[in-house]
Image (cartoon, rainbow, N blue to C red):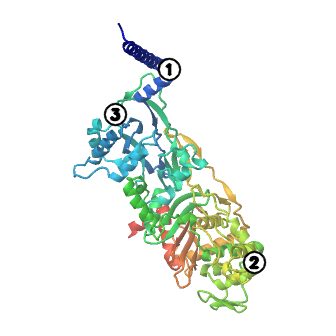
């Protein structure tokens, strides 16, 4: 007979079996549901994930367009650059496996026993892979062929470590025209937030400064795409057949207005040890033939490895000479005696001055105005306007300025390129100048408590008090000589595609009236001629053999007790101008002595006279 205890044991076992069976049924039901979900409900999604583990969509970066000089000489091109990078989606997920890859990378050395990677930057890159999944993270920039081969040798041990090839900018002439050309660098976080960079992604290289920035959109082109098959390590094993790829469209080439020969002559004429600028422009259409800002920098530093790039950047950024500043378009200086041409032009246009007019007060070395005695740099006696410009006599223009008044003088100056409104050159960073009058002077100096007084006209009439850029100075002297309007200064001559077809051609644009009466024009040309070609002219060191040059010199005061800024602005041939040149050397002294010989060297190169002169010697 079974006892009650035996019966209870059987019931317990049956109950346990039932619970076990129910649990098994539930487990299998869950598995079946999950299997159904994977096979049917989420089939497309899981298939896509599977394909993504095997296939990779690769963006094909378009090659950036080149920059040429006006004669087809390359100024900027591209070079291939190898990058070692981490591909997040192909790195192991487990920490131990990732640490193993980290340590293997850290222990890789070159033939000299030097480590390829440092622990800090490598650790930072591995940390970034946790939130950056869709693009490679560089761990070694601009790798050498030897370094690439070392990584490839260890490829089986380094899943998720890939070698990429991208192009970097190369500036074959180093510092030449560096402020004009600009440079490229990886887009910053701040730039990515701006609407202008909505189509850019982190890691893209973007133009910074100069033509690289001004024409970045044209240089970029359009990226392409291809689908490739990868192995477990994330390395490409072949392109997927039957899937159409999209080839990248290269960026446009820019044919600039720069003349390489002339640019070289200008660079050689201004030593890198001085602060200054030079602009050579064709006044007939606004084409900039050469532009120098000294001291210069080498834009190739921005295409180097990170450590070298940071070292180079720190060096130029902390340099007290400010080599990053393009003085030619953003340097603001008093125009000095070059501005006397504007004072004279305003007087001639208004009829207040004439070629035969002499002021009652001759130049005896200074001019008394009320309680103030205003000096002249010399003693010149009685002069007319042509002689006053030739000798750059201050006393004549003190009297002329008071009679003409600043409203007329400023109007004439703006008409030929001076003023607060920038000329609109096609590289970023240009500044406008300043032509003071009673209203603008009071507004500008309100905090200092200074008020406009008529006596200020004495300084302003000789160009001590206004602000101009070297670009404005070259544009002014050029348009004054042509008398046919002020053309917008520009660097872009043509944009061409890879086949050499012209996509866009710059059309010269008149932006200021730049005209005066024929009688005024004749007198100013005679004065500019006299400055260079008369034995007593202040600009005689700028004369050329066989070519008539017209010019005006200037010595800009800027700091008491310091040497003046040396100005020289010239055109040639004077009566049929092809080139206008403005030179400024900071704290160098007299313009006729210091700046004129530099402009002469540039003009000699332009007209091919340096070879003739060398042959004679």
Question: Badges 2 and 3: C-beta atoms under 8 Å apart?
Answer: no
Image location of residue 165, percent across then percent down? 38, 41
Q: Determine which residue is flagged by label 1.
A: 37
Image location of residue 329, percent across then percent down? 57, 63
Distance between the alpha carbons at the discs numbered 2 and 3: 79 Å
Dot 1 or dot 2: first in sequence order is 1
Tell which tag, 2 or 3, sits nearer the viewer.
3
Distance between the alpha carbons at the discs numbered 1 and 3: 30 Å
Tell which tag, 1 or 2, sits nearer the viewer.
1
Q: Quadrant of residue 470?
A: bottom right
Q: Residues within 10 Å of mark 1 (few under 14, many from 20)?
A: few
Image location of residue 617, percent across then percent down? 38, 70
Front in this rendered view, residue 561 or 153: 153
Dot 2 or dot 3: first in sequence order is 3
Q: Which residue occupies the extreme right position in the image?
A: 351
> Which structural element holds mark 3?
loop
Front in this rendered view, residue 229 or 603: 229
Q: Residues within 10 Å of mark 3 (few under 14, many from 20)?
A: some
Mark number, residue 233: 3
- Quadrant that contains the N terminus: top left
Q: Determine which residue is flagged by label 2.
A: 405
Q: As displayed, is residue 148 above or below residue 385?
A: above
> Which structural element holds mark 1?
helix
> Which structural element holds mark 2?
loop
Q: Which residue occupies the extreme top position in the image?
A: 1
């Amino acid at each position: 007979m079974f006892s009650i205890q035996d019966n209870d044991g059987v019931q317990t076992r049956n109950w346990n079996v039932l619970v076990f069976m129910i649990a098994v049924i539930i487990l299998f039901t869950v598995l079946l549901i999950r299997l159904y979900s994977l096979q049917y409900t989420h089939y497309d999604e899981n298939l896509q994930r599977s394909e993504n583990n095997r296939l990779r969509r690769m963006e094909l970066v378009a090659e950036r367009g080149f920059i040429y000089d006006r004669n087809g000489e390359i100024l900027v091109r591209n070079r291939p650059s190898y990058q070692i990078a981490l591909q997040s989606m192909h790195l192991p997920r487990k920490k131990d496996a990732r640490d193993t890859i980290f340590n293997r990378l850290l222990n890789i050395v070159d033939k000299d026993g030097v480590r390829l990677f440092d622990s800090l930057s490598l650790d930072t890159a591995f940390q970034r892979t946790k939130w950056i999944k869709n693009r490679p993270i560089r761990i070694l920039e601009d790798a050498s062929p030897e370094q690439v081969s070392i990584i490839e040798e260890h490829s089986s041990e380094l899943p998720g470590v890939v070698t990429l090839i991208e192009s970097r900018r190369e500036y074959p002439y180093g510092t030449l025209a560096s402020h004009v050309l600009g440079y490229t660098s990886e887009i910053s976080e701040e730039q990515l937030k701006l609407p202008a960079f909505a189509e850019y992604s982190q890691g893209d290289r973007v133009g910074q400064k100069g033509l690289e920035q001004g024409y970045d959109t044209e240089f970029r082109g359009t990226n392409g795409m291809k689908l490739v098959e990868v192995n477990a390590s994330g390395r490409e094993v072949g392109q997927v057949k039957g899937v159409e790829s999209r080839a990248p469209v290269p960026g446009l080439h820019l044919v600039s207005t720069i003349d390489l020969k002339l640019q070289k002559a200008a660079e050689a004429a201004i030593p890198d040890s001085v602060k200054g600028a030079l602009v050579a422009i064709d006044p007939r259409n606004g084409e900039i033939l050469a532009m120098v800002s000294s001291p210069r920098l080498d834009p190739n530093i921005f295409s180097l490895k990170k450590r070298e790039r940071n070292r180079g950047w720190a060096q130029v950024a902390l340099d007290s000479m400010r080599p990053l500043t393009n003085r030619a378009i953003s340097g603001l200086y008093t125009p000095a005696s070059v501005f006397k041409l504007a004072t004279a032009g305003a007087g001639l246009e208004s009829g207040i001055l004439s070629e035969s007019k002499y002021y009652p007060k001759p130049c005896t070395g200074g001019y008394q105005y009320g309680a103030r005695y205003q000096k002249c740099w010399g003693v010149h006696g009685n002069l007319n306007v042509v002689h006053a410009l030739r000798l750059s006599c201050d006393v004549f223009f003190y009297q002329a300025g008071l009679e003409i008044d600043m409203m007329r003088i400023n109007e004439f100056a703006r008409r030929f390129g001076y003023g607060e409104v920038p000329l609109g050159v096609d590289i970023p960073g240009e500044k406008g100048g300043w032509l003071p009058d009673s209203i603008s002077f009071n507004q500008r100096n309100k905090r200092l408590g200074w008020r406009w007084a008529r006596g200020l006209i004495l300084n302003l009439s000789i160009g001590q008090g206004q602000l101009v850029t070297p670009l404005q100075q070259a544009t002014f002297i050029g348009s004054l000589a042509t008398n046919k309007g002020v053309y917008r200064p520009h660097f872009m001559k043509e944009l061409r595609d890879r086949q050499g077809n012209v996509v866009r051609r710059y059309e010269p644009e008149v932006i200021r009236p730049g005209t005066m009466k024929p009688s005024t024009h004749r007198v100013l040309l005679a004065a500019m001629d006299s400055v260079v070609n008369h034995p007593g002219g202040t600009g005689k060191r700028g004369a050329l053999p066989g070519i008539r040059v017209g010019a005006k010199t200037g010595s800009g005061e800027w700091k008491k007790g310091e040497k003046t800024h040396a100005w020289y602005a010239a055109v040639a041939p004077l009566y049929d101008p092809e080139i206008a040149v403005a030179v400024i050397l900071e704290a160098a002294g007299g313009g006729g002595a210091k700046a004129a010989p530099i402009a002469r060297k540039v003009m000699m190169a332009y007209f091919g006279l340096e070879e003739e002169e060398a042959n004679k010697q």
